[in-house]
Structures are given as C-alpha cells and as structure tokens.
Amino acid sequence: MNQIQVEIDLTGTQFGVKPPGVPMPKTIKLLNDGFKCPNPTKKASNMYVCCVKDPKFKNKKKDDSNKFLPRQYGDLNIVYDVLQAYGNNYLAQVTMDNDSPLGRLDNWNLTWEWKRNEFIYSMRGAYTLKKDFSDCIYGAQGQYYKDFDFTPVMNCEKRPIIADLPPEMENDDKIGKLPFCCKNGTLLPPTMNATKSHAIFQLQVFKMPPDLNRTALFPPQSWKINGFLDPEYKCGPPVRVSPSTFPDPSGLLASTYAVASWQVVCNITRPKLKSSRCCVSFSAFYNDSVVPCNTCACGCDEDAACDPDAPPLLLPSEALLVPFDNRTAKAKAWAKLKHRDVPKRLPCGDNCGVSINWHVSSDYRKGWTARITLFNWADYTFKDWFTAVRMDKAFDGYEKVYSFNGTKLPKLKNTIFFEGLPGLAYLLPISDGKDPENGPRVPGKLQSVMSFSKKHTPDINIMSGDGFPTRVYFNGEECSLPTEIPKGHGHRSRVSLLSLVLLAVMVM
C-alpha cells in the first residue's frame, strides 16, 4: 500500500471558522501533466476527488527560441558549468568523463586559454602547476583591481596548466571534499572502473571589463589534455549546451541547474607513423624466427648512426628478453644461421617503453591457443594497466584467458579487453639483472595464455596468419604492428618463449 498511496499531514492555525464549521481547502487536484480532475466532493471533514487520464492531452512543444545545441558523444567529454555568477566573478565546475572503453589518462594535465583576461582566484579538487600572481600585478588585472589583494590568487597565466590532487588531499576542508576528485590524475575506462572514469574540480574565476555583469559569461578556449604514456587527445571548441542538472544538496528529489554550461569533446587520435609509444612483435610455434617491432616504431634520433628506414632483423625468441642494445650479436648470429643477409648499416631499434609479444602457441582440430607477453622497458611502474586486441577473424572463437581478466567489448568491433587480476595490476619497470655491471637489464614482464575454439570460426586458418591481431592497444595507446607475420614454412623450435621466460624468472 505504501507504494500506491501517500499521506501528508498538515498542521496550521484556524482563522475565521467557528464551530461547528470545519476548515477545508477550496479545492484539491493533481497537477501532474496528462490528468483531469473534476470538482472535489466534500463530506464533513473529508474531501476527495478521482482524477483520470485526459485522452485529449498533448505534450506542449518546447520553446525553441533559446534552443541549445545537443550534447555530443566523444572519447573524453568535458563540461564547463557556471554554478554561481556575480558581477565580477563566478564559480565554475569542470567535469571530465572518460566514455571510451579504451581511453585512459595518467597524471593528466589540462590546459586552456583565457581570451578575456580572466584569472583563477582559487581552486578545489585540482591545482595549477604554477602558483604565481605576478602576471596580474603587472598586467591589466592589476590596473583595474587597484586595491585588490592578489596574494591568495592561484594563477594569472593566460594558459594555466591544471593537474589533479593526490589522494591524501581528498578530505582536505579547503581544497578537497569533491566527488571524483583527488586521484593523482588517473582516468580509467568505465569498463575497468566506473568510479575512476570521472574527475571534477571547481575554480573561482575573476573577470575583467567589459564583462562586469553576472550574465557576461565566456568559457576558456583552446582546450588540451594529455597524460603520461597515454593516447593523444584532440579537443574541439566549447559548445553552449543546456544547463547541467545536479541533485539538490538537501537530499530532496529536487534538481538544481547550472547558470550556464559548455561542452568540450575530446577524441583519441591514431598515432602517426613512427610516433607510437608501444609496439608489437609476432611469433608462432611453426616458425623459429620472431618478427620484432618495427624500426623506429616509437621514433628515432635524427643523428642516429643506425638506419631508421631499414626493416628490422629477425630474432631468435630468447632475444626478446634483453634490451635492443644487447640484441645485435644474437641478431647477426641468427641471420647467419638462417642464411639471411645483414646490412652494413644496421636498422635502428624500436625505442618503445612498452613492447608486446603475441605468440601463436598451438593449433589443433577443435581450437588453438595464443600467448601474450608484456615487456616494460621504462623506469616506470604501470598501475592498473590494460591491453586490448582486435581479432577480426578469431573474435567469435575466444574462450578464456588464464592469468588475466578478459572481456569482450560490445561497443568496439572484434575487440578483447585484458587487465590484471588482483595482485597483478602492476607492470613493474626494468631492473638490473643478476650481474648489474656486465649483464643486460631485465624488463618487467607479465604473461598469459588464452584459448580459442573453432566452433564458431570453422574457416580460420592459423598457419596463414588468422591467429594474429589486427590492432593492439596498451593503456589506450594504439601500438605499432609488424608489417610481416611469421610464415608457415619455417622450422619449428623445440624451446618456446614461455619456457625461456620461466627459466629467466627462476634464475633471477
């Protein structure tokens, strides 16, 4: 009964009604759109009315005279809301939503350009990398606000650089206590952690003439955002949209509205040739040689003595476990063994901080298996890492990954998402080997085997290369793929990369 009825008790003071009269309202009706209520019936101290749906009711057309542009969908959606407006200043809130299943930002830095000499007085939930009010004192702001104390001002730069607060500031009374703030600049994809896919901060902005009234509101322009070893985003201009709605802070079922709102849509761009931040090597059980990462996959120095345009030399599987500078002897010996020519000017390395090896492990009548190995060559620990592969011909046959979490992404074509299990969410950095003085350094490694069935992909041909991904991502960045795949006529090796990795771990 509590879900189909509601009782409201009213308490008041009676005026002008003498006994035995009963104070009653003049009428009672339902104000919800689409209902029709007749005159109420009164009996003593009771009044009731039966309201029915109006069959002639039609929704009123909204007034389009002040119509806003519809909100758009992008990989990263930023909203600039003005929450409070005064004559010479306003309070704004910036909300960032990572809506891409593969988008990610680590230690994000957000910047924009003030076009009307505004300056940031204070912030909550974030901070500017440069806290300096000298530009205001010696600029147009100081000339107008002559008696203004600029000491507490956070930033007066035309292009401020804004960063997220660390987690320990989350409950700070002055600069914290905002939902989704203070994550050290981490924005994970919603498929991985919905809570960490949002970020919010607020800022008090002071304006300059001629914008000294509360309706003269202009958002900053030229928005840019980037992270550490993350995909590159390209942001569009701010677009005026309908005012954002927020839950009433009192907890009631009411909504509050922003004074004005603008949306900035940012999308991930594909890396240019030789500008990736990660690369992929291919290997297979039916060929002894590994197809390494592309030459200069992540860039090369212009004055390098090596050849930046030469194709990479094929490698034995054990060469993947050592840095590029320590592979030369192995690559030359392998080329001699396989009767392949070695150019006088050797090809340059890939110069990537992260490399991924995709190895086709087996092929049998009902299915096949593959193994993915992540190598971290950087002096940086990747927390909450993830990788994704696009399998155009093998996606429907994916069954299971054994040492990672694996998920098929419904919104991305033929893409499988992998992340670490609890306790395996860290990809450790490169470290010294057993002999730090003479031996090569050892990369951080993570590895897992995955199984595929041929039930839903009966025409798949593993030996011809159908078992290799057509796109690979690491932490949202699209990795450089080899231009070749292992061929099926090579000699099979009795020693697999898995055995070598396990042996290296046991030796360490």
Image (tube, rainbow, N blue to C red):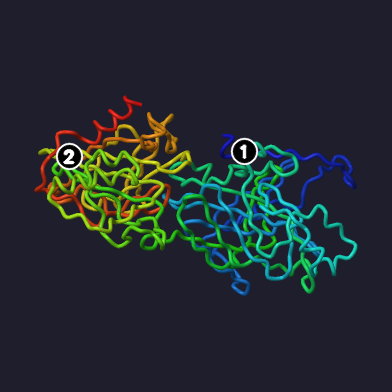
- 198 or 260: which is nearer to us? 198
Q: Position of residue 312 (x, y in %)?
A: 26, 54
Residue annotated with mark 2: 368
Q: Position of residue 461 (x, y in %)?
A: 13, 49
> At 15% from the left edge and 53% from the top edge, which residue is drawn?
340
**Would residue 56 be seen by someone viewing this image from the given angle?**
no
Q: Residues within 10 Å of mark 1 (few under 14, many from 20)?
A: few
- 330 or 264: which is nearer to us? 330
Instruction: Report, in whole angstroms, how far the alpha carbon at label 2 lies from the one at label 1.
Output: 44 Å
The quadrant of the image that shows the C terminus is top left
Quadrant of residue 259 in the image?
bottom right
**Would residue 247 be seen by someone viewing this image from the given angle?**
yes
**Amino acid type, label 2:** Trp
Dot 1: what SS? helix
The quadrant of the image that shows the N terminus is top right
Residue annotated with mark 1: 167
Q: Position of residue 296 (x, y in %)?
A: 35, 57
Of the numbered discs 2 and 1, the one sitting upstream in the chain is 1
**Amino acid type, label 1:** Pro
Q: Is residue 156 left or right of residue 455?
A: right
Q: Is residue 271 left or right of residue 62?
A: left
> At 51% from the left edge and 50% from the top edge, which residue is drawn?
228
Q: Residues within 10 Å of mark 2 (few under 14, many from 20)?
A: some
Q: Are marks 2 and 1 in contact (CB under 8 Å)?
A: no
User: Disc number at residue 232?
Assistant: none
> At 38% from the left edge and 52% from the top edge, which residue is drawn?
351
Dot 2: what SS? strand
> At 78% from the left edge and 58% from the top edge, which residue is drawn?
133
